[in-house]
Amino acid sequence: MNWTVPGTVLQIPREDASHIQELFGSMFLAGGIVLSQVSGITGLEPYTVQNWVKRGFLVPPEKKRYTLRQLCRIININMLKGVLPMERICGLLGYINGQLNDESDDVIDDSQLYFMFVTLAAHVREIAGEQEREQFLDKVMASYQEPVPGAAEKVRQVLRVMLTAWVAATIQQQAEAMLKVMEKENM
């Protein structure tokens, strides 16, 4: 059964989630992707992405080409926007990365954050409780090298919020689908 990669319209088998970094990396072999490709991956209208750039949610593309880091910031925002207001999303991402339109103050690259999140999301069904979540989070965070003391705990906190918000959005979508089935049955 295919799984929709969080924040995108891409469908892959859930067991291939561990290869998402390679899949995304292959898209950037030519040095970047253009806005139409970003839209194709995320399902967002081009004007939405351009608006986010204008509002300072990410650094502008260079020569109209987006980096993997920028794509992952867009995906992170897209994934959370159905559950959290934009100012809360910006606050969450700013908690670990300071000014959103300045990558020099980031404590984690947005692509690393996103790939950690995808690993968590792909295994969320196997995580029964808080203790198991924390153990799995330890595994996901094992390769993270904090640039400043305390950065790892901040990243952990953000990943917890992202996972909770994503699960909430998934449950909401399931509820909507169930309601649609009920409405069809009553016709």
Image (cartoon, rainbow, N blue to C red):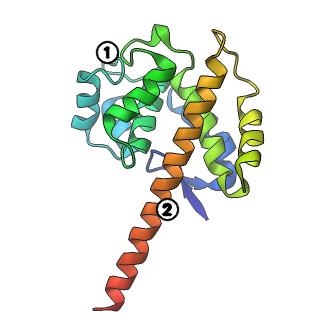
The N terminus lies in quadrant: bottom right
Q: Residue at x 23, y 22 (%)?
A: 54
Q: Residues within 10 Å of mark 2 (few under 14, many from 20)?
A: few
User: Can you name the residue that lies furthest to the front here?
Assistant: 130
The span from disc 1 to disc 2 (Cα, nearest Å) is 39 Å
Q: Nearer the viewer, residue 111 or 132?
A: 132
Q: Secondary structure at mark 2?
A: helix
Residue type at the position of mark 2: Ile
Circles 1 and 2: CB distance less than 8 Å? no
**Residue 87 coordinates in the image, percent (x, y):** 32, 32
Q: Nearer the viewer, residue 25 or 168?
A: 168
140 sits to left or right of 98? right
Identify which amino acid the numbered label 1 is placed on.
Answer: Lys
- Secondary structure found at label 1: loop
From where the camera sits, is residue 25 visible? no
Residue that mark 1 sits on: 63
Q: Earlier in the sequence, mark 1 or mark 2?
A: 1
